[in-house]
Image: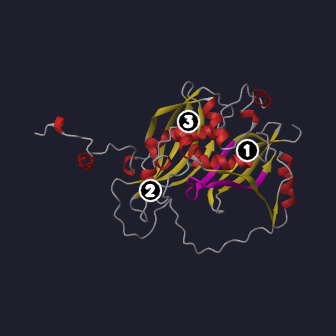
Amino acid sequence: MTDDDSIEWTDPDTFARALERAETKEKGNYFEDFAEGAVLDHDRGLRLTRWGNETWMSQTLNHDPAYWRTDAARERGFDEPPIHPDYLTAATLGITVEDLSEKGGYFLGRTDVRFPGAPVSPGTELRVESEVVSTATSSSRPQYGIVTWRTRGRDAETDDVLCSYERTNMIPRREPLETDGSGAAAAEDDGDGDDPAPDLPETFVTPDGGSYEDFVAALEDAADRDAAVAYRHERGRTQDDVTVASLPLATLNTAKQHHNADAMADAPSGDIVTYGDVTRSTALGHARSDERTWREVGFDDESFHTFVTPGDTVYAFTRVLEADDDSSAPEEAGTVRFEHVAFNQNDEPVYSGIRTAEIQKRSR
């Protein structure tokens, strides 16, 4: 029997041999661990603090005064500056990472992102659960499967749903699937790349301002001719240690993609990458700086198209889809649907999504 006390465990050669024999205690789940209909109650929770909210907002350039100043919040009908929906969404997803996607895999998309009508107050404690909506195999990527979850972030005290969405990821399999390589399974579309590029509208119309009436006027100007209401935003945000590592870790997002440079050195990105919700929130912050946002309603068809790594700069492009002065919006605002595209310094799209928001009317 070996006398452990006689071993110099920190001798480099000895320790290297020990590491070769030691079993790694793994984190996260493989594709095979997810069964349709299963509900995962994520043990971790997060207290949504004003500090966390303001840190997220400031670093992603979301400067709506109603989320910073009490007087501006009260003009919007809030008792105090509430939690911003971007921070709420990022915190809800971050808590799920250890159970759902820590093993890695491609984030294929998210949709049906919705929030309650009532504001979420600082100090609210978050409890999160996810239901497995579907699982699918991939014959083109036999080392992965495809999983879709419906996630709900709840007030831990009242059980009210504060944020909900559906997201889909490719998740590594414990054992690669045997396949004939004939193609992808349903829910995965690799495309053949043979479709011709569509012609762009002849004219791009830019709204004169950021009020609801400005978006209505721009859409009317573009109607009945070959035009689109589309424009880019001037601001850009270069990714640094705060956005790439600090913000995701502050939402309890433990994915190695955001903080383990050693593990990511041999990954397709070659480096750690920005949390998708940081990229998204930054692009939305650029867009919101050119509009008078009243309230976020929801998001659909969100996709992340390529990696964002330290040193990359995130810009934003907006297309206005429609404006509707419907009865569901308060009298101070009208509802506008946007398509937002985040892109990098090489003009490559990195994120896209459809956003519905209530925009203040000029009379306010």
**Main SS class of the magenta portion in the image:** strand
Residue hosting label 1: 357
Which of discs 2 and 1 lies nearer the camera? The answer is 2
- Against 157, residue 338 (above or below) is below
Relative depth, front residue between 195 and 261: 261
* Residue lying farthest to the left in this orientation: 1
Question: What separation in Å lies between label 2 and label 3 (alpha carbons)?
Answer: 33 Å
- Against 275, residue 317 (above or below) is below
- Against 204, residue 289 (above or below) is above
Relative depth, front residue between 84 and 63: 63
Question: What separation in Å lies between label 2 and label 1 (alpha carbons)?
Answer: 39 Å
Which residues fall within the magenta stretch? 297-322
Mark nearer the N terminus (2 vs 1): 2
When asked about the image quadrant of residue 10, the answer is top left
Q: How many marks?
A: 3
Q: Is residue 196 visible to the viewer in this orientation of the structure?
A: yes
* Residue lying farthest to the right in this orientation: 363
- 182 left or right of 166 in image: left
Please report the residue visible at 68 percent of the width from the left and 31 percent of the height from the top. 82
Three-letter amino acid code of the residue under disc 2: Ala
Three-letter amino acid code of the residue under disc 3: Gly
Q: Position of residue 226 (x, y in %)?
A: 81, 67
Relative depth, front residue between 9 and 292: 9
Residue hosting label 2: 265
Which of discs 2 and 3 lies nearer the camera? The answer is 2
- 268 left or right of 343 in image: left
Mark nearer the N terminus (2 vs 3): 3
Which disc, if any, is residue 153? 3
Mark 2 residue element? loop
Q: Position of residue 62 (x, y in %)?
A: 70, 42
Three-letter amino acid code of the residue under disc 1: Ala
When asked about the image quadrant of residue 232, the answer is bottom right
